[in-house]
Image: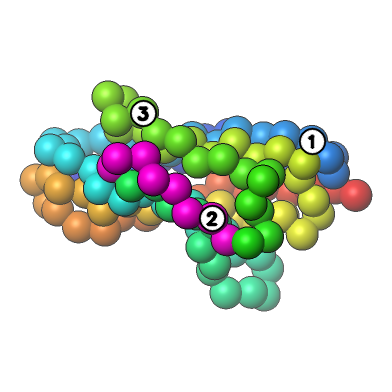
Amino acid sequence: QVQLVESGGGLVQAGGSLRLACAASGRIFRIDTMGWYRQAPGKKRELVGTITNGGTTNYRESVKGRFTISRDNAKNTVYLQMNSLKPEDTAVYYCNADIVAVGSGNYWGQGTQVTVSS
């Protein structure tokens, strides 16, 4: 069974940094696009950014220049490096991946809380 497990959330002051990780496990043949989403209280889930299997990235405008998505294909892991954090970045962050596996499909992680204090 394919699973995505996130780690690295927490509480940080404005201007600080956090690094999230999301590891996929299971009988995986290949992972295509991986991405990070976030959902703040009372708001819809929104895309933070994505990274293709070849390493091409795409970000929402509000995080460009502050957030960096990377991946380690050998470890089936995607990372989100968040710098210069702002209170408005506070949300539950979810990873997402298109996985070719025994049980192919689009998968979500369980979410990890990121709280940025002012």
Spot occupied by residue 30 in the image (x, y as percentages of width and height): 17, 40
The segment highlighted magenta reads 53-60
Q: Residue at x 79, y 36 (%)?
A: 16
Marks 3/2 in contact by CB < 8 Å: the verdict is no
Q: Is label 2 in a helix, a strand or a loop?
A: strand
Q: Residue at x 43, y 52 (%)?
A: 50
Q: Does the image show residue 6?
A: yes
* Foreground pick, 86 / 92: 86
Return the residue found at the far left: 102
Q: Residue at x 71, y 55 (%)?
A: 89
* Foreground pick, 71 / 56: 56
- Residue 60 is drawn in which quadrant? bottom right
In the figure, is residue 15 to the left or right of 101? right
Marks 1/3 in contact by CB < 8 Å: the verdict is no
Q: Could you give the CA–CA distance between mark 3 and mark 2, rounded to whole angstroms?
A: 18 Å
Q: Label 2, on which residue?
A: 59
